[in-house]
Amino acid sequence: MLSVGALALAVWACETARNIGGIQRDQTPPVITLTNTAGDTQDIAGGLRFNVSAVDNLALLSVNLTFSGGLIGTLDTTFLGQVKTYSVARQITFPAGSGAGGNIMIVGRATDGAGNFAADTIFIFLRNVQALQVTLISPTPGAIASQGRSIPIQVRAIQNSGIAKIGFLVAPAAAVTNPTVPPNDSIVFLGVLRDTALYTDTLNVVAATGTFDVIGFAEDSAGRRGFTNIVTVTIQSAVNDVTPPLVSHSVGARVEVNDTVIIRATDPSAISWIGFRVDTSGLLLKFDTINVAAGNLTDVTRRASLNLGSVLPPGVLPHQIVVRGYACDGAVARNCSYTNTTSLLPSAPITPPIVPAVQIVPPRSPTALIDTVIVVNGLTVQLAGTGTIADAIYNANLRELYLTNPGLNRVDVFQVANTSFVAGGIPTAGGQPWGIALWPRDTLGGYKDTIIVADAGGSYLGIINVGAGGPRQIIWRQSLPDFIIQTYKVIIQAGGAVVHITDYHTSDLPQYLATVCRVASGTSACHADSVFAIYSTAPTGAETPPFNGRATLRMEKLINTTDPNLMFGHLFWEIGTQSFNETTDTLRIFLSRGRNFSKVILSACGGATINLARMGLGDRTFTRNTGNFTHAFIGEGGNITAQFARVMSYDARNQLLVGTAAGCSTGNATRDSGQVDIDFGMSPGREVSDFIANTGIRVVSVATNFNGLTNAVRADSIYYLDQDLRRMVTSAAPPGPSPLTPGMDMNYFHDFAPTGQCPPGSTFCGGGTDKNQRLMFSASPSGNIDVFDTFFGAFLGSIPVRDPIIGPLRVARDAGGNQLLFGVTPTGLLVVQLPPIVNPLPVPPHH
């Protein structure tokens, strides 16, 4: 018999199940999406940029952002009222000297009014040379352990000013013991601090069940402490183990012959063997395993080189292979397996299994995970430190590539002979080394073992000896003059006329750089007094309008002297002499080399009339010289304000007229005096404007061939121009989205024009020596190097490489005559020995 109370309770429960009043509780979670707006890798100068989007069917209560890794913090947003949709672009800025940087995990959590929630996660690498980056290399998520076995601990810390302390913490501490004598969990460094520290230790597991957490930490020289993410290790039993280990592997979709394959295996009975297998066309190519039983480790990660150079026949690249991980445990049954999970390391999608060479225990589901990858051309060497590469040049005499690294205030030196970087590079190149060029010896392509470096952080060029007698020492700094652009006007007023001179100040900081020379009479040797640097400037923002934020183009004779009378500088005003239907000004240019030396190098007597606003160039104006040092080619890039970007060319074979100081009448009883220096080598304004009239583009890189007959501009496509800057043909080669792939260069031996006769009127279209050298190499967003014919603009093929080239690309002649291609990628410096390429164009006519 039920009591009243019991009955009431039963009825209440029944009515609750029937939802009294018909009101349904909201059980629909919101949706949140995080997206990055500036790529997976971002510079700290631009801040941390990402988008947050959240939506709910009724109303959002809050959106919470949690940052970990290279940035620790939270960012919470709580809503008042009914907000169903939330979308915001976040940009987190950092003060100067901030230690934030490295890999940052951002977790977004959206919660609605009923308590339903959803989360999304993204990773962004924040590039900051000042950041303290701390990484827990081992253990990694998914780690397991067992009583009586060991587990490795490895922490890495990087900070530009030095690491003072590095270590790890375990909670609960009683779950493990440290066999190190004496036991410790950190190292303190004294004296000169290294910018990179690695701490390695091994812990013995004493707990029989449960879990324990591991976190790494480090302190930099300023006492700032950084932490890694927490990794939870699960303790399992190894009694009567007949289960094979969990095995994962990670390898790129494209690999070079010596690339790394990462294999990770876990098992409570410890790992005894670990390695990988490579097959091609169903045949075993390589089986590489090592015995790691002595470590008694339940979690082992091996980083092994594929080392395919000795097993792949020559001339087969690109070539397809199949890669699998492999491991055996230390149990009595000796359980083994190929890759059988993707939970330990990222791996390829499931593909049909390959029959193993020997019988092993069948792997867990998913079955026989493998990676089908492409072995591609080239060798990628990690750059020496962080920073960015602005420009590069190759010296075949010494087989060295010089790369300007303004982020680290040095020139990095890569030696082809041993495929490695010189430690420390060249630190005397300047505070912000940018453009770089070789010192010409003759107009046949010879050069000295001397480099010229433009310091965008100072008003000088660094002249550095990289050959005998150095090594790599600065010889002198060539101070650059201050040019003041002036307009000269005669104003008629009562009682006579007055002269009105207006000054316009521009930046003197050099940016990109090319070198040319004028020869001694009757020879191909450069005259000792006629080696010139042609350089664009890096604006500072303090320029006088209309030059604010604008670059100018200049030339400086390279001479080791302190006598300003022996120096020569020129501002290329010639590019502004255009016949536009606009008001023009009479130009005057004043040069100063300090308080004790100044002169007018273009007086009003020259009668040069220009449109002043068109003299300023984009803030990233590229300059390149030809292989024979007779020409230079310049392309206006960066923040161009004109509708069309401009290009210019320079021919050192033409006259350089250095005037003598003289006076002249400028009308109405007024006079002016000074020199009238004119360089007839610079392309006149009418040719510059001709390119504007034909091509509306934004320049991202330029290239020129050995003799200056073919010039190339890359923007939305590659445009080929003749020596008079007339556009001749185009190649469809867009540089792609972010990250941009602007790099391009011509074959070193390229001596063709993009116009002229074809056979039978000439041996090859465009003249030249060998049509197989009539090639352009262009970085492609797909990760290939595309090859084009520069006379027809036709696509000839691709050279697959591992990573897209996002920085400078250079093609150079090596000492033995082979051609090398260098390119800066997100992972380092790519070096490719270019294979022979047969150019079939023009196709023989059909009869």
Image (cartoon, rainbow, N blue to C red):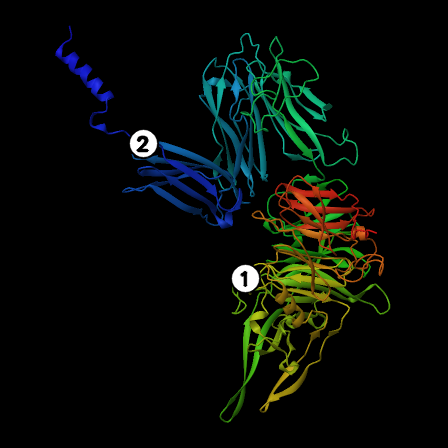
Left or right for 280, reference 608: right
On the rendered structure, is 91 left or right of 202? left
Estimate how packed mark 2 is, as few (under 14), some (14 to 19) or many (20 or more) residues with alpha carbons within 10 Å.
Answer: some
Q: Would you say residue 468 is visible in this rendering?
A: no
Residue 105: percent from left, percent from top: 47, 36
> Quick one: 29 or 462, which is closer to the camera?
29
- Which residue does the image show at 71% across and 54% down from the upper left? 793
Whole-number angstrom distance, CA of label 1 to CA of label 2 = 52 Å
Q: Position of residue 94 (x, y in %)?
A: 46, 48
Q: Residues within 10 Å of mark 1 (few under 14, many from 20)?
A: some
- Of mark 1 and mark 2, the one earlier in the sequence is 2
- The single residue placed furthest to the top in the displayed view is 1
Element type at marker 2?
Answer: loop
| Residue type, label 2 | Gly
Closest to the observer, 474 or 323: 323
Q: Mark number for residue 115?
A: 2
Instruction: Name the secondary structure under disc 1.
Output: loop
Between residues 597 and 651, which one lies in front from this camera angle? Answer: 651
Q: Which residue is mark 1?
A: 540
| Farthest residue, direction bottom | 495
Q: Residue furthest front?
A: 847
